Image (cartoon, helix red, strand yellow):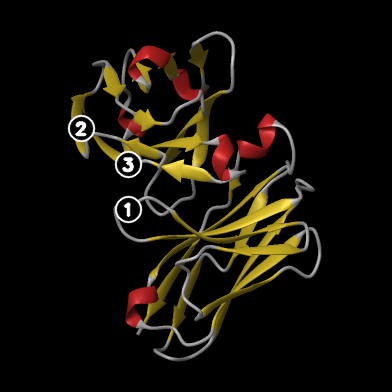
Amino acid sequence: DAMVIQNPRYQVTQFGKPVTLSCSQTLNHNVMYWYQQKSSQAPKLLFHYYDKDFNNEADTPDNFQSRRPNTSFCFLDIRSPGLGDAAMYLCATSTRTGVSSYEQYFGPGTRLTVT
Amino acid sequence: AQSVTQPDIHITVSEGASLELRCNYSYGATPYLFWYVQSPGQGLQLLLKYFSGDTLVQGIKGFEAEFKRSQSSFNLRKPSVHWSDAAEYFCAVGFKAAGNKLTFGGGTRVLVKP
C-alpha cells in the first residue's frame, strides 16, 4: 500500500544535542509537509516543500531545518533541541495541483522527548 | 483572516449513542473541508472530505458530514458510536487564498462510555 513512513516512531535526545527525524513516502507526491503537534493541540505547520522548493512558515524557529534530497525522502533537523521542542512531529504529503492538493496524507508521527 | 473553530473541546458519549462534532469556519468563499481522526500516539487519518457537489458526504468508519454554506459549518456525525471511536477529531479547512496549506481547528476529544 502507498503510504507515508516516519522513523523512528519514538526519539529521545538530550537538551542541545542535534537530532534528525526522517520521513519517506511511496505516494510519489510532490509536496511534503512537516508539522509539530504538542499535547492536546492542533498540528502546527513548520514548513513544506513543493518539489525542491522550500517554504518556511514565518514563525518557525531557526532551530528547525529541513532537507529533501529526493521526491521520496524528507528530513527534519533540530539543531539544538530545547525542552519546549518535545512534541509529536508529523510528516504529510499531497499532490501539487488541483483540488486534491489540499488533501494531505499523514504519517504515524515521531514522538520526540528531550531530556 | 481565515479561521476554523471547533467549539467543543471534549465530548463524552455513551456507546451506541449518536455523535455530532461541530466545525465552523470563517472565509468569504467556499473552502475545501476535511475531517481527520487521531488515535493516541498516532498520525492523522482522513475520515472524509468535501470539495464541491452534494453537501452530505460519507466517509469511512460510518461517519458522515454535512456542509452548510449559510452557517459556514461542516459538522461530523455518526449515528451509533463504538468504543473504538474514542479519539481526537480535527476539522481542517483549505482556503484557496492560503495555497495548499490546511488550517486546523483546535480539535475535539471524544470519550466513549460503556
The chain under label 2 reads: B
Q: CA distance from mark 3 to mark 2?
A: 11 Å
- Mark 1 belongs to which amino acid? Gln
The residue identified by callout 2 is B11
Among numbered discs 3 and 2, the one appearing first in the sequence: 2
The answer to which of B60 and B9 lies nearer the viewer is B9
Q: Nearest to the eye among marks 3 and 2: give it.
A: 3
Q: CA distance from mark 1 to mark 3?
A: 7 Å
Q: Nearest to the eye among marks 2 and 1: give it.
A: 1
The quadrant in which residue B106 appears is top left
Q: Which mark is residue B29?
A: none
- Mark 3 belongs to which amino acid? Gly
- Residue A115 placed where, x, y %? 35, 85
Q: CA distance from mark 2 to mark 1?
A: 16 Å
**Quadrant location of the N terminus of chain B?**
top left
- Mark 2 belongs to which amino acid? Ile
Horizontal side, residue B23 vs residue B45: left or right:
left
The chain under label 1 reads: A
The residue identified by callout 1 is A41
Rendered position, B97 above or below A51: above
- Residue B53 placed where, x, y %? 59, 10
Q: Secondary structure at mark 3?
A: loop
Both marks 1 and 3 on one chain: no
Q: Are marks 1 and 3 in contact (CB under 8 Å)?
A: yes
Q: Secondary structure at mark 2?
A: strand
Rendered position, A59 above or below A71: below
The residue identified by callout 3 is B107
Circle 2 Cα neighbour tier, 10 Å, few/some/many (<14 / 14–19 / ≥20): some
Q: Are marks 3 and 2 in contact (CB under 8 Å)?
A: no
